[in-house]
């Protein structure tokens, strides 16, 4: 499995995708909201800056980025015309599928980690505010919470990539999700956002009550309803099942 994951990473490396991801994470922290102020000698307002970068990244930028990268990973063999080479792999198509899921999970994790580190480096350099242990712990929880739910959504993008065998439908889907994420956060009553899986990565950003809690505590304490977790698990299982059924019935993948 490690060799399979390494093989997938090498394929992405040839496209310089790693560099693109790092640059995207860096640009998010600089050009979103208060980050622009550093070019004019202005001090970054810590909490406002963190909130804006995390919310826009989780709801908009990352949706566009991760959906399209994930769909590309799963449709690449079709778009490149190399699907027949899958028969030469010393792995079953199910292992290839799981390897791609793990690869995408690693990519998402790396982007989150890079963005988190850069955010706090910029704050340390350009903010007059103090980074306390509470603030650091809170935003670690915010990013961990969002990361988990981004991984939950991977099989949906994987299924679109497998079925469409190209990037057109996934790209349209990513645009729709990103626009709706922003629109629904503004227009929907607060209690309804806990039912929509694509909004789950942003929930912890919107809950200042979560300052002292970790992800599990947020759910247990009722800050995040238990049905949110149930919906997330159901979404992951359902989308994974759809992918596996498609693989089982497919002759070429």
Image (tube, rainbow, N blue to C red):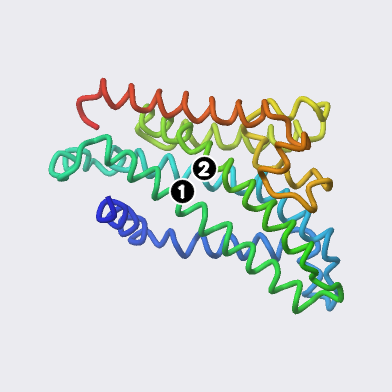
Measuring from the top left, give residue 196's x and y in whole percent: 66, 28
Seen in the picture, residue 41 relative to 92 is either above or below; the reply is below
- Local crowd size for mark 1, using a 10 Å CA cut-off: few (<14), some (14–19), many (≥20): some
Write down the residue under mark 2: 151
Displayed quadrant of residue 158: top left
How far separated are the C-alphas under marks 1 and 2? 6 Å
Displayed quadrant of residue 140: bottom right
Measuring from the top left, give residue 242's x and y in whole percent: 40, 23
Nearer to the camera, 182 or 235: 235
Q: Which mark is residue 137?
A: none
Is 10 left or right of 115, judged from the image as shown? left
Residue for point 69% across, 51% down: 142
- Local crowd size for mark 2, using a 10 Å CA cut-off: few (<14), some (14–19), many (≥20): some
Is 84 left or right of 161, judged from the image as shown? left
Residue for point 49% across, 61% down: 20
Q: Secondary structure at mark 2?
A: helix
Is 172 left or right of 118, judged from the image as shown? left
Write down the residue under mark 1: 105
Q: Quadrant of the C terminus?
A: top left
Seen in the picture, residue 241 relative to 140 is either above or below; the reply is above
């Amino acid at each position: 499995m490690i060799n399979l994951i390494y093989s997938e990473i090498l394929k992405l490396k040839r496209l310089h995708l790693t560099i693109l991801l790092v640059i995207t994470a860096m640009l998010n922290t600089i050009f979103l909201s208060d980050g622009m102020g550093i070019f004019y000698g202005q001090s970054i307002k810590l909490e406002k800056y963190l909130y804006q970068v995390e919310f826009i990244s989780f709801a908009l930028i990352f949706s566009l980025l991760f959906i399209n990268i994930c769909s590309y990973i799963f449709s690449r063999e079709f778009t490149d015309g190399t699907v027949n080479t899958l028969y030469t792999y010393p792995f079953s198509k199910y292992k290839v599928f799981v390897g791609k899921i793990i690869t995408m999970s690693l990519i998402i994790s790396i982007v989150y980690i890079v963005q988190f580190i850069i955010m706090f480096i910029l704050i340390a350099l350009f903010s007059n505010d103090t980074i306390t242990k509470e603030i650091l712990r809170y935003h670690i929880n915010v990013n961990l919470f969002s990361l988990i739910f981004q991984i939950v959504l991977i099989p949906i993008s994987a299924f679109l990539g497998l079925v469409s065998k190209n990037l057109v439908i996934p790209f349209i889907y990513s645009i729709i999700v990103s626009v709706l994420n922003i629109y629904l956060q503004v227009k929907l009553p607060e209690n309804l956002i806990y039912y929509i899986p694509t909004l789950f990565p942003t929930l912890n950003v919107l809950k200042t009550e979560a300052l002292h809690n970790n992800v599990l505590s947020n759910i247990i304490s009722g800050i995040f309803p238990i049905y949110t977790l149930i919906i997330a698990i159901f979404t992951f299982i359902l989308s994974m099942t759809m992918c596996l059924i498609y693989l089982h019935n497919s002759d070429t993948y």
